[in-house]
Amino acid sequence: MLARDYEATEFVLREARENDVKFIRLWFADILGNLKGFAITVEELEHSLTRGMGFDGSAIEGFVRSDERDMYALPDPNTFNVLPWRPRENAVARMFCDIITPDDEPLESDPRAVLRRNLADASKLGYTYYVGPEIEYFYFKDAKGTVTEDRGSYFGQGAGDDATDLRRQTVLTLEDIGIPVESSHQEGAPSQHEIDLRHSDALTMADTIMTYRLVVKEVARQSCYYATFMPKPLDGVNGSGMHMHQSLFQGDRNAFYDDDDEYHLSETAKFFIAGLMKHAREITAVTNQWVNSYKRLVPAFEAPTYVTWSTVNRADLIRVPDFKPGREDSRRIEYRAPDPACNPYLAFSVMLAAGLKGIENRYEFPQPAQMNALRLTQAERDELGIEALPANLWEAIGITERSELVRDALGEAVFNSFIENKKIEWENYHSRVADYEKEHYLPVL
């Protein structure tokens, strides 16, 4: 059974009393990254913290086979927070849960358990995995269409539009729930916005991203708008990404920093980059898991399409930010493929596994891209060994299905369920007649 911090448990019970908490939402994620959960009353809180709360998991995507139903949600006391948008009297709190079996063992198909296993692999090598996401999203008038709320542009400072107030209120709500924000701004497309979170360890950040997505939507809903993390909701403009800044620490030392290197990158960082690049095509189905994800990964919209790295070009898969003297702890890499609709527990797992594989096998560090790969001919890209990211979900599924790295990182149960689910999604999409086909073919064929 998972060890629990009893001081944290006592803190939760005290916080619940002092904040007049009546209901506690027990949250977890299915394999697709959808937030799931149920509510208990405060009278059940102490019991749930020590023994978990039972529920029927057969309806949760990817959790169990049909003959395995009973499981328990064991709250993590370190994730207790009062929800600021609910009434203060008879208040509502939330905690993220680890899912356990009746035998008190972690459920192997729980995405949080998957990430814990991969973080344990890093810990055995002496590493703590830190991540900091840049999360983009859109505001629309409602969920029925894509009528934009504003006509802003990148870093726009227009006064009087509701989106600015929505973003401001979102930041305040995030901080009220204990999520530190670094910055926020208008993004490149109309009604597109970005809120960047302060880096933390990967498990905390995965929980944070799940909360972030709910807060963004809730604040928009309260003002009669709709917020979406759909990767590409509009034609002809940038899609929404979740660029992921990553580093490994050994204790208090940034394992990615080397003062003597021309890029100020250690060998560990270079091997990690090489691992991400070597396995990038294999992990893309996880970091970009929806049919719509691949409408974003196209040329000309600042999204990566080729497996390259550089220090300057924001269309590369990996960007190494410029180094500023005195900020050794901030040396990091930015992996730009993921989108904000992924399952963060699984995405972190496969990115970490790829990086650690590079460290373990000491993969050769590739040269940085000398120019934008889009400006090269296919023959030139072939000569340089530049691979393309998968062009659609079906291609990505086929590559991932053959990946031992992804199978090991996710575990057999999650891997098989994820692949099966994605194949069903592709078949449902592939068998539909699109508006494009009707517009272009019906009048002439």
Image (cartoon, rainbow, N blue to C red):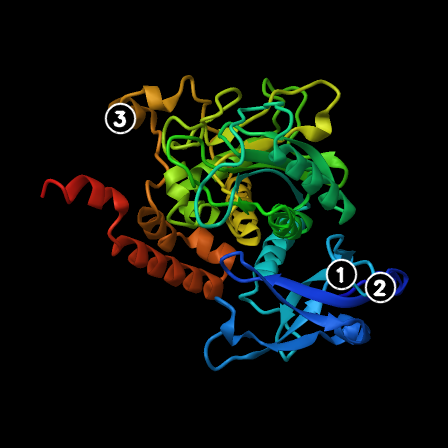
Q: Residue 97: percent from the left, percent from the top?
A: 67, 64
How many numbered callouts?
3
Going from N to C along the chain, the mark reached first, 3 or 1, is: 1
Real-space Cα distance between discs 3 and 1?
Answer: 54 Å
Callout in the foreground (3, 2): 2
Q: Residue 11: percent from the left, percent from the top?
A: 87, 61
Q: Residues within 10 Å of mark 1 (few under 14, many from 20)?
A: many
Please say if 314 is above or below 5: above
Residue in the image at 27% along x and 53% along y: 430
**Which residue is identified by label 1?**
93
Real-space Cα distance between discs 3 and 2?
Answer: 61 Å
Secondary structure at numbered mark 3: helix
Q: Residue 207: percent from the left, percent from the top?
A: 65, 53
**Which residue is identified by label 3?**
378
Secondary structure at numbered mark 2: helix
Real-space Cα distance between discs 1 and 2?
Answer: 8 Å
Q: Residue 64: percent from the left, percent from the top?
A: 50, 73
Q: Residue furthest left?
A: 445
For residue 161, what is the image quadrant? Answer: top right
Viewport quadrant of the N terminus: bottom right
Horizontally, is 89 left or right of 433 in the view?
right
**Which residue is identified by label 2?**
16
- For the residue pair 194 and 138, the one nearer the viewer reads as 138
Viewport quadrant of the C terminus: top left
Q: Which mark is residue 25?
A: none
Q: Is residue 258 visible from the viewing direction of this image? A: yes
Going from N to C along the chain, the mark reached first, 1 or 2, is: 2
Horizontally, is 257 left or right of 110 in the view?
right
Mark 3: amino acid: Gln
Q: Residues within 10 Å of mark 2 (few under 14, many from 20)?
A: many
Mark 1: amino acid: Ala
